[in-house]
Structures are given as structure tokens and as C-alpha cells.
């Protein structure tokens, strides 16, 4: 996504009509013991979450803001002001705005170069992990929506999603800033099905407006010269000074509780034994393995262990993981030669290295971020001669987060090498993704040079 803040952008009135039809799920700070706001640039905390910060102040909830950059490149074409001059000015404005919203709020300025978060991502990750480690629970993290269109916003949102997903007792809300400017309410890109709204009373709206006015370097011209125009003019500000603040809840992986409920209703799972579809798909999966024998195999989401039992005939050691205790209990009885762990990947990961990893019929239950992290963990623990086998149902599933084709394409985009097997039929897609030293079966057998 690319946009120019100097363009008029979407009319705020068009969003007003659109938002009137959005059934809002309210943001409720009751029970929240701390709030941590991630702001890529000074004023993002006010534009995106200033009302929430003020409401937290009124409720006596402590707030800490992680200011990632000082926004020194907000006016790259200015003939009157340099980034070196803007940096301290914007830092001062940030402190004044935050005092207006929440006089007791604290802040950490990470001083990452403006526009350079991708090259300094570990600075934010470490700071957020450290802040959450000492925060009371539950803690609400508020960060930019990863689809907002600005590179620093995207990366800040991704880091926040990853850290929150790995930190018990925390939750996340994502705020849009520039999406109001470039998105089209007639065909919106933003995930309004996951929208959350925080009503703002007159006093909170006034404090938010005064906090935004504390940024004259952004809301007023630096001079009359071209290149010194305001970044947040009145039209832009109108998006953020509504009677409510809008956030997006993260797309989450299917919960462990839902799998527990499934096995309580259907102890056999998905009829892995009796279904000819399951039997045939299992045979195709085993036939796609590029070697007759493996040293160490890992099956992620092993369910009741039917495929796991077959893998024990093809590997010296087999480990199966599943989030559901009932499934693991059945799997242990069905495949006594395998080792099993109850684990929710990617946050929980078995120790060891593998030359075969199987991800069958579970990838579409993962959020996009969890799927990405799962692929990364496979890559980190896969031997050079190892393979990842991914097999997924292509029809709709009411419990799924995405679908089989999306999962297969996302893995392929993240994997360093092309698949050596890519099998697609009406019902499922199966791909075998190779490690760096894997060659074709015929080449491995010496049939071709």
C-alpha cells in the first residue's frame, strides 16, 4: 500500500455513513490492570488511541507508551527544518500530549530512526517483552493495525501481535491511522468484522483534541514554503476526533477449548479410521514422502494418532503434538512406539531436530501470524536434508481461520525453496517443501545427473 498524505484522501463523511452501519463490539477496560501503547511516531498514540489513554487515566489504570521513533522525517521536503531539528521538537510535543491525556502516564523513547523500524525490529521486540514482563495482569497492548499502509506501522503491529501471542495474560487491540486516509468504505480493506469501538464522552474528546493540538509541527504549517504543509490537517484530524475510537481485534487461531469441545462431542475426532477420504489422503501423503526412511519425524496437530502410527513405520523416532488432551490420550494408545506432547504450537514447541515435519489439516486453524511463526520454527529445527509435508482440505470449514489454498500459498511464499511435490485436487492440496540439500527422488537414486 502506498499513499500520499498531501492528497485529500477519503472524505470523513463517507466513513461516518459507513460506521453507522457497523455493529460495534464495545471496548471495555473493566478488569484491565495496565495498558501499554506502541506508537511508531509521536502523535500516533494520540490519533489512534488518545481516547483510550484518557479513559484509562479516568479509571486509574496505569499507561506506558513505547515511542519507537521521534518522527524526524515527517517533512522530508522542508526547506526550513532539518530532521535533526525536528527530532527534539517532536519528542517535546509527545511529552506534552501525553500529559494532557494521562498526567501519570510513563513513556520510553526507543529512538529508532524514523522509517527504519524494519532494520531495528529487535529494539521494539525487546522493549515490549521487557515492559510486559513487569506489568500487572491482565495487560492490554494497543498498537498500530498491521495493514495501516506505513512500513513502521506494519512492523510495529506485527511485533505487537507476536509478543502478545507469546505472553499469557495480555491482549491486543490495533488502531488504524492512515487507513482512514487511503481505504475506501465502499470496498473496505480493513477488517471491520473484527472492529471494536470505545465511546468517548465530551471531556475525553476535548482532551484528545487538546493533545493533538500539542503537535503544532504536525497540525500547523512549518512555514509558507512548499514542503512545510501540515501532516495532519483538519480533514485528516476529523477521522480521529469522532465520538468513538475504533480498533481491530487480532485474528486468532482456533482455541484449545474448541478442540476440547469437539472431542467431547466426537471422541473419534474426524473419523480418521473409517472414512475412505481420510484413508486415501493418508496414503497419498505417505506416498509423497521423498525417502523410504527418516531419522526423526514430527507431526504437528496429530489428533488421535492415525497418521502418526503410519509414520512410525517410516521413521526411527516419531513425535506427535496436539493441543487437545483427549486426542493425545487416544494417540498414545494407537501409536505406542511414538512420543507425544500436549502443546499449542507455535508458542509451545518440542525440543529436537527433525528431517520430516508433517502439518496435516491444521494450518487453516492458525492465524496468519501463528502460521508464519510455525513455518519459521520448522525452518529453525529442520535438518538440511529434511522436508515439511503440508496437506490441507480445500472446502469451507466453519471452524477454520483461513482455507487450505491460502495456507499452502502462505507456506510457499515463506519457504526458501520451491516445493518438490505440489499435488492439487478438488478436495485437498499437498505440498512437500525441501530443506537446502534435498534433491529429487530420481536424482537421489542416481537415475539422473
Image (cartoon, grey):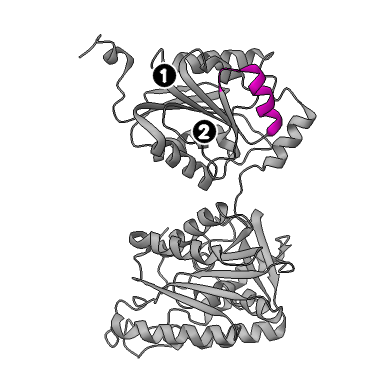
Q: Which residues are magenta?
A: 325-338
Label placed on residue 244: none
Q: Which mark is residue 294?
A: 1
User: Left or right: where does residue 384 sit relative to residue 24?
Assistant: left
The quadrant in which the N terminus is found is bottom left
- The 10 Å Cα crowd at callout 2, few under 14, some 14 to 19, many 20 or more, is some
Q: Position of residue 302 (x, y in %)?
A: 59, 27
User: In the rendered view, would you say 420 is above or below 372?
Assistant: above
Residue that mark 2 sits on: 405
Instruction: Give the residue displayed 28% in from the left and 88% down from the top.
Output: 80
**What's the residue at 44%, 24% (across, down)?**
296
Could you tell me residue 306's position as x and y percent?
61, 18
What is the x, y in percent for residue 298? 49, 28
Query: Which secondary structure lies at badge 2?
Result: helix
Magenta stretch secondary structure, dominant: helix
Residue 245 shown in magenta: no
- Contact, mark 2 vs mark 1 (Cβ under 8 Å): no
Tell me which residue sits at (37%, 64%) in the image: 117
**Quarter of the image containing the C terminus?**
top left
Q: Of marks 2 and 1, which one's residue comes earlier in the chain?
A: 1
The image quadrant of residue 397 is: top right
Q: Is residue 331 magenta?
A: yes
Amino acid at each position: 500500500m502506498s499513499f500520499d498524505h498531501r492528497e485529500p484522501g477519503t472524505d470523513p463523511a463517507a466513513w461516518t455513513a459507513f460506521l453507522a452501519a457497523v455493529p460495534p463490539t464495545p471496548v471495555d477496560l473493566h478488569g484491565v490492570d495496565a495498558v501499554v501503547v506502541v506508537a511508531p511516531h509521536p502523535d500516533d498514540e494520540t490519533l489512534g488511541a488518545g481516547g483510550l489513554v484518557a479513559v484509562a487515566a479516568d479509571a486509574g489504570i496505569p499507561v506506558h507508551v513505547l515511542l519507537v521513533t521521534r518522527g524526524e522525517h515527517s517533512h522530508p521536503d522542508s526547506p526550513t527544518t532539518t530532521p535533526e531539528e525536528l527530532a527534539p521538537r517532536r519528542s517535546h510535543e509527545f511529552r506534552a500530549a501525553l500529559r494532557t491525556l494521562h498526567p501519570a502516564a510513563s513513556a520510553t523513547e526507543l529512538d529508532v530512526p524514523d522509517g527504519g523500524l524494519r532494520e531495528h525490529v529487535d529494539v521494539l521486540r525487546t522493549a515490549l517483552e521487557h515492559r510486559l514482563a513487569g506489568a500487572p495482569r491482565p495487560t492490554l497492548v494497543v498498537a498500530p493495525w498491521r495493514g495501516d499502509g506505513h512500513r513502521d506501522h506494519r512492523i510495529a503491529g506485527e511485533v505487537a501481535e507476536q509478543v502478545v501471542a507469546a505472553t499469557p495474560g495480555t491482549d491486543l487491540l490495533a488502531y488504524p491511522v492512515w487507513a482512514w486516509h487511503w481505504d475506501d468504505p465502499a470496498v473496505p480493506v480493513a477488517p471491520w468484522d473484527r472492529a471494536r469501538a470505545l465511546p468517548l464522552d465530551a471531556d475525553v474528546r476535548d482532551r484528545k483534541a487538546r493533545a493533538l493540538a500539542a503537535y503544532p509541527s504536525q497540525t500547523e504549517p512549518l512555514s509558507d514554503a512548499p514542503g512545510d504543509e501540515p501532516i495532519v490537517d483538519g480533514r485528516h484530524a476529523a477521522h480521529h476526533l469522532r465520538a468513538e475510537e475504533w480498533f481491530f481485534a487480532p485474528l486468532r487461531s482456533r482455541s484449545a477449548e474448541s478442540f476440547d469441545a469437539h472431542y467431547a462431542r466426537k471422541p473419534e475426532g474426524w473419523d480418521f479410521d473409517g472414512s475412505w477420504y481420510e484413508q486415501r489422503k493418508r496414503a497419498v501423503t505417505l506416498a509423497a514422502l521423498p525417502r523410504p526412511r527418516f531419522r526423526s519425524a514430527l507431526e504437528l496437530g496429530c489428533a488421535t494418532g492415525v497418521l502418526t502410527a503410519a509414520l512410525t513405520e517410516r521413521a526411527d523416532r516419531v513425535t506427535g503434538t496436539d493441543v487437545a488432551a483427549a486426542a493425545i490420550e487416544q494417540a498414545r494408545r494407537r501409536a505406542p512406539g511414538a512420543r507425544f506432547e500436549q502443546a499449542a504450537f507455535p508458542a509451545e514447541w518440542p525440543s529436537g531436530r527433525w528431517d520430516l515435519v508433517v502439518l496435516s489439516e491444521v494450518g487453516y486453524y492458525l492465524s496468519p501470524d501463528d502460521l508464519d511463526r510455525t513455518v519459521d520454527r520448522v525452518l529453525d529445527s529442520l535438518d538440511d536434508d529434511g522436508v515439511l509435508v503440508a496437506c490441507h482440505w480445500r472446502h469451507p470449514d466453519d471452524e477454520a481461520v483461513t482455507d487450505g489454498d491460502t495456507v499452502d500459498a502462505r507456506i510457499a511464499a515463506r519457504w526458501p525453496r520451491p516445493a518438490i511435490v505440489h499435488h492439487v485436487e478438488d478436495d485437498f492440496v499437498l505440498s512437500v517443501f525441501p530443506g537446502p540439500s534435498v534433491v529429487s527422488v530420481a536424482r537421489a537414486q542416481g537415475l539422473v545427473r
